[in-house]
Amino acid sequence: MRPNDLGPFWLPFTQNRAFRHSPRMLSRAEGMYFYDESGRKILDACSGLWCVNAGHGRPGITAAIRDMAGRLDYAPTFQFGHPSAFTLARRIADLAPEGLEHVFFVNSGSEACDAALKIARAFFAKKGEESRVRLIGREKGYHGSTFAGISVGGLPNNKKNFGPLIGATEDQLPLPYDAKTMRFTRGEPQAGAEYADALEDIVARRGAETIAAVIVEPMAGSGGVFASPQGYLKRLRETCDRHGLLLIFDEVITAFGRLGAATAAERYGVVPDMITFAKGVTNGAVPMGGVIVSDRIYRTFMQGPELVIELFHGHTYSGHPLACAAAHATLDLYRDEDLFARARKMEPVLEAAVHDLKGAPFVSDIRNVGLAAGIDLEPDPAAPGRRGYDAMRRCFADENLVVRISGDTIALAPALIATEDDISRIVDGVRNALKRMN
């Protein structure tokens, strides 16, 4: 069915007026491909929005959702529960590093980050350290679009026009990347761990007794695919331990195989106090997110009279039965097809392919880690963001590709099922699109 009125739907993070002039409609999806209303095959180069890690249209996920809808369309998780949510929480906790034992379900990555930040502040209040309210983010960080997320986030366009943000969130770590010395880095930069030392400066200025938590993405995804330098996350962990701060890894993008492991925490051997997740947990089929919380934090809440609510937070659809069914089926796919190992195998293939774009028109930097890559384009001085938009538009219209853009950066994140041919097609398509630009 083709709509005859594009006005009512206000698309998020989209140039709506430009879209109505030249809509990009996706009507069906299967495997690595979208299809438009005419049946044109369009290769998905970014796993939807970093979420369809196992490829589109997986029959096992569809069947699980259908079966659950016929048995339990909805059940509240305020004062009640349903078995699938408990068994799913166990499976997710088992994938996390040792010590992260409890899962709080929400419906999106934005809500997951919001919940983690609230838990951090409430944790210290429970401990009688009410002065610990500061939340520290990082430049180019993206932690969703709630007021909490944009307050600790480091993308200026997401903050402007929304007035005063949440207090005690103004301190930010620098992005651990120097274009002068790290341009065209392959994988994690060897230098740059010292960027974590900026946290000591903030502690010295503000006082550890005022700081609750630090939240970082192990790979800055929406900000342009910036990998953590070698040793950086370990140094952050050490500083947090030294001053009693909580460390939160925002793994909404990196969890469930994007970096070749169940979590980035596993890849880097660093255990945070909380991990946020979403996207890949259901393969994008049903909205779901959550926070994996350390046993130490959980036990702090489980004090006092048993009939007192420990955390006044949650959502109508937390642990929704259909989302739980989709997540169980998705985890089965990751396990049965060994997709995390497949991502590790394909990482050097993507790395070699994207870095072959060095020297292509307008390319000023290329970065990669796991099955993700960022390609910076030289901005048009008269219209920043135009070249990124033009590249996305040309990839779709001329090269049958869906790519992600952030300003003048192209982001690639193919599904974990991608083949070498798929990756070659993606990179060749981007190259061809760049050649037609001005």
Image: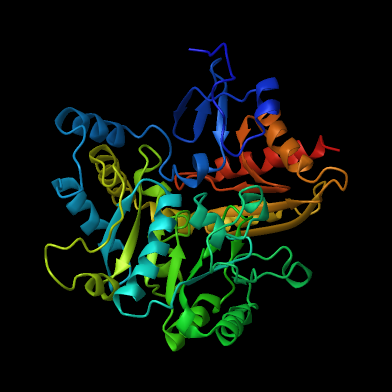
Of 273 and 392, the residue lying toward us: 273
Q: Splitting the image into 4 quarters, where does residue 92 fall?
A: bottom left
Q: Residue at x 53, y 17 (%)?
A: 39
Residue 136 visible within the image = yes
Residue 220 visible within the image = no
Say whether residue 358 is left or right of residue 255: right
- Give how far across and how far down residue 221 sits, in percent: 57, 55
- Give how far across and how far down residue 178 sits, in percent: 72, 70
For this orientation, the residue located farthest to the left is: 306
Q: Residue at x 32, y 62 (%)?
A: 292
Quadrant of the image for the C terminus? top right
Q: Residue at x 55, y 77 (%)?
A: 232
Q: Splitting the image into 4 quarters, where does residue 67 fall?
A: top left
- Give how far across and how far down residue 373 sits, in percent: 61, 54
Does 277 sit above or below residue 22?
below
Of 224 and 291, the residue lying toward us: 291
